[in-house]
Amino acid sequence: MEKDIQIAGFRWIVFLFIFCFINPLAAAEHVVVQLKWVNQFQFAGYYAALEKGFYKAAGFDVELRPNGYDGAFVSPVDAVVSGKAQYGISNSGLVLDYLNGKPVVALAATLQHSAVSWIVLEKSGIRNIHDMANKRLMTVFPLSESLELLEPFRAEGIAPEKLNLIQTVFDLQPLIDGKVDAYDGYVTNEPFLLEQKGIAYRLIDPRTYGIDFYGDVLFTSQNELRDHPERVAAFRKASMDGWRYAMAHPEEITDLILNKYAPQKTREHLRYEAKAMWDLMQPEIIEIGHMNPGRWLHIAEVMVEHKRLIDDKALNSFIYNEEDYQPDLLRYLRIATIASIIALLLAGIATWIYRINRRLTREIAAREAAEQQLRRLSETDALTGLANRRAFDQQLHKEFQRFLRYRHTFSIVMIDIDLFKRINDTYGHPAGDHVLTEFAWRLRDHIRKTDILARIGGEEFAIMLPETYPWEAKKRTLLLQQIISKTPFKLSDTTDTPVMITASFGISSVAENDLIADAALIRADTALYEAKNNGRNQVILFNADRKPVLVADKTTA
């Protein structure tokens, strides 16, 4: 092992020596990057790498090709595989292209969480993935570009024949006009356009259903990597340097995009994109471009319908590892003299080994800490600090397994804040966020330590009550209804302006003949729906006769 390290150090020292003499004389190499969409902040890092000189310093003459103008879409995968471009931007569907035989290599994941989401109008009444069955769904073809949006249907048991998929026209107007029911969009882009028009909308996010993929993946072809490993390494580094600069100087890059790349955009729109991308990238805790092989393996297994891949090493040729593609530096030995090599070796090898070992130790520790933080963040609602839908579903499945094995009962309470949209419309979203946070705190302060409280979307919350029968769940829920409805909420920490809030509640318990973990959840959601339809501020229990029964309404609460 020590000998291998010394040899590797030797090769790198020689390479650096030669690079210092040869690189300044090399002509800039022309490379093409096929973007996946029109010019916008989504590709800010590549603009920064080009305009701030990172590509030039690495010896590249880079051409960035936008996509989607005039309704025309070029598949980045096809462009790179065919040789029309050397690099491209795709999504996590890239791994399925690889498994289907296309020679692609993922270099870096710009977004740790995909920005793709279904967008529906609030007036459509569509609240979840099940409501979208047999609806008109506008998405990107080929479907490998839309896999993270299609996977929730399969995960929820919705048959493919119930999906009415329509080729996108890359315009929100069909959704606004009611010609389609759902639109394949980016949370960094289309929500801003709808808000500007004053149109209420709802996001059906794949992450709500446990589908959490990478987004905006930089990739190349296996031919490019085999023939030009040095070029791939240099291009990736320059691109990531560009992204670090862009996220550290968003206003400067916003000016650049407005002046040169997307003058039709507004400053407010680009700022909206930058803020949304920061949340999806998480650059404060995760190195930009980081990819986890285990997560890629999980994504691949989801895409092939949860069948285990034959070998955990099946993606080795798909995930880029710079150490696997070091150039053969022996051909450079003719340029350097034996005396220079020995002098460099003696002067640097001991220090290099010591420093590299220290750096590797720090990097491993930092990476492990980042992975732990990422796991925690992936299961936590950012606004309230409660468990999110993903964490709640995991606990629900565990509790259902306990029920199947030991017959330990449990109950579920679904909660929805009544007329919450009025708060946002009247007082603004910051006030709405403050109400959501205080609402969460009140619930948390009045449940047991063993209960699981989660925010599962918007103004919807859920509580799982282990070892709790229906009559006891009803009693506890009535107490929560009183706590919410009788004490006014503040709109911020700096004002005493009160606002009265009510909520609707749906209760259900696990039943002896339940076959799936979600059965009790679905019944509780049905009871909640009845509570909302019957006038709100009600508690409805889905009883043993499989019927929603009113427990308490606004007159008895």
Image: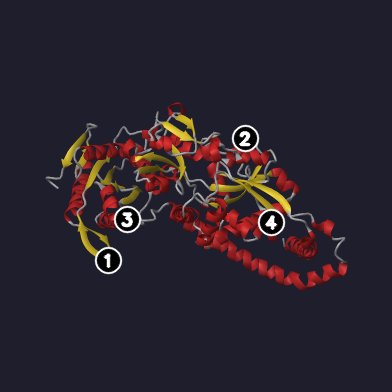
- Mark 4 or mark 3, which has the lower sequence index? 4
**Front-most of 167 and 390?**
167
- 356 in relation to 55, above or below: below
Q: Mark 1 or mark 4: name the one nearer the start of the chain.
A: 4
Closer to the chain start, of discs 2 and 4, is: 2
Could you say which is closer to the camera, residue 204 or residue 250?
A: 250
How far apart, in angstroms, are the residues tagged by discs 2 and 4? Answer: 28 Å
- Amino acid type assigned to the residue bearing label 4 in the image: Ala
| Identity of the residue drawn at 36% across and 57% down | 385
Disc 2 crowd, CA 10 A, few/some/many (<14, 14-19, 20+): few
Callout in the foreground (1, 4): 1
- Callout 2 touching callout 4 (CB < 8 Å): no
Instruction: Identify the residue under disc 3.
Output: 433
Q: Nearer the viewer, mark 2 or mark 4?
A: 4
Please indicate whether residue 457 sits to the left or right of residue 3 in the image: left
Tell me the distance, in whole angstroms, between the alpha carbons under discs 4 and 3: 44 Å
User: The residue under label 3 is which amino acid type?
Assistant: Asp
Quickly name the residue at label 1: 494
Query: In the displayed image of the protein, which residue is found farthest to the top?
Result: 161
Q: Nearer the viewer, residue 418 or 29?
A: 29
Q: How far apart are marks 3 and 2 (CA)?
A: 44 Å
Q: Which residue lies furthest to the left in this view?
A: 555
Q: Can residue 261 be seen in this view?
A: yes
> Alpha-carbon distance for marks 2 and 1?
57 Å
Q: Do tag 1 and tag 4 residues touch (Cβ < 8 Å)? A: no
Please name the residue shown 16% across and 54% down the image: 486
Mark 1 neighbour class, 10 Å CA radius: few under 14, some 14 to 19, many 20 or more: few
Residue at which label 2 appears: 100
Mark 2 or 1: in front is: 1
The part of the image, by quadrant, that contains residue 506 is: top left
Q: How crowded is mark 4: few (under 14 residues within 10 Å), some or many (20 or more)?
A: some
Q: In the structure shown, which secondary structural element does the residue marked by tag 1 occupy?
A: loop
